[in-house]
Image (cartoon, rainbow, N blue to C red):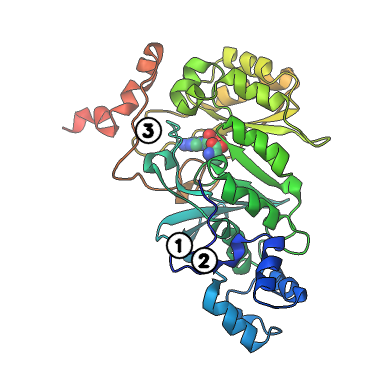
Amino acid sequence: MDRITHDRDGKLLLKSLTRSELEEWVASLGEKPYRAKQLWRWLYLQRVGSFDEMSDLSRDFRERAAAVARVDVLRCTGTHRASDGTRKLTWETLDGGQIESVLIPTETRNTLCISSQLGCAINCQFCLTAKMGLRGHLSTAEIVDQVVQTRRQFEDEQRISNIVFMGMGEPLHNPENVFPATRILTDSDGLNLSHRKVTVSTSGLVPEIRRLGVETRVRLAVSLNATTDEVRDWVMPINRRYPLAELMGTLRSFPLPKGERITFEYVMLDGVNDSDDDARRIVRLTAQIPCKINLIPFNPHPGTEFRPSPRERVERFRDLLLAKNLHTTIRETRGDDRMAACGQLGKPGPRMPKRADPPQRFRSVVAEAAEGPTSTDDSTR
Ligand code: SAH
């Protein structure tokens, strides 16, 4: 796993550098330290896309810099607006891959959901991105550029107040590039996002969760999605490496800033993880962890073997948790009509990762959908 700081042509990616690294680079060119400050401001306050636009830098410096370094790294290949105002932005990465970000406006905030990898290696059974497999890690610059270029496009209209690492990829599988990105996003002389408004979401990579607590100050969300090892081993095979007891133990000792909570995301899968017993087990599992629970209605996609829990089930589940004093919300599905909702980013690849076999007693729950739409279409044949 590598820190990515250069493109294929050997050009330095300026947005991969933290402020102190940028200062070192400027010094290595024999320039005065204030040049670094000027550059940083052009990158993150003015958010220009090229050295040409950095008008208070000498032409000589701009030319020397442009010869060895680059400003923008992503190419925007499309923006789509869903009927609810959610915007999906697609980008071409340095390697020519396609990644996505989703801008979600609400009355009180504008959240940008960003990607950390091209595809994903974790193979969660209900997620569309998983079907791509992992094609590569994003550089810090590609992560940061999603924020910079989105702000540039929607400058006044939709100022970004919150960042969630909930797009494509598993951010804690790419910590060498994600951690510096969180430092850049929260730099007070630049994009200046509050640490409390940057959230890294993980499927549960235990060693990297510990590192996140030590090396950054951003918020943590964990995709729980099941309450027993039996079910979690199936729907999130990463659980076989880091089972529930180990995961929850790590979260119990996570260094949470005062007054902060860990968010648990819980995708509601019909007949799989949505029983009253599951709700009771959530209460037990999360005991002694300051937390909130975010129930996510499952967003179906072609070929999935899962179905969303009925709305009444989701609401009853929430009520059971609320009755135990767990702070619980239901995430409203956003951006659905543009395939920009949770777990709907990306396109299945030619070599799909292996589907995990459900435990015996769940075979009847998923079998029907697993055969695809044709199995319900018999009458038309
Ligand atoms: N890999 C990280 C970041 C992705 S966040 C993680 O797992 O946390 C994306 C969130 O959407 C996760 O909580 C995931 O469980 C959820 N999700 C995945 N597929 C989904 C789907 N089809 N419908 C609803 N939520 C989904």
Q: Is residue 57 above or below residue 213?
A: below
Label 3 lies in ligand 1 vicinity (Cβ under 8 Å): yes
Disc number for residue 20: none
How many residues crowd around disc 2 within 10 Å: few (fewer than 14), some, or many (20 or more)? many
Residue shown at the point (57%, 71%) measured from the top left: 71
Mark 2–mark 1 distance (CA, rounded to whole Å): 6 Å
Disc nearer the start of the sequence (2/1)? 2
Q: Helix, strand or loop at disc 1?
A: loop
Quadrant containing the C terminus is top left
- Describe residue 305's horizontal placement relative to residue 194 as left or right: left
Q: Is residue 196 above or below residue 307?
A: below
Residue at the disc numbered 3: 304
Residue at the disc numbered 2: 73
Residue at the disc numbered 1: 94
How many residues crowd around disc 1 within 10 Å: few (fewer than 14), some, or many (20 or more)? some
Residue shown at the point (77%, 75%) measured from the top left: 34
Disc nearer the start of the sequence (3/2)? 2
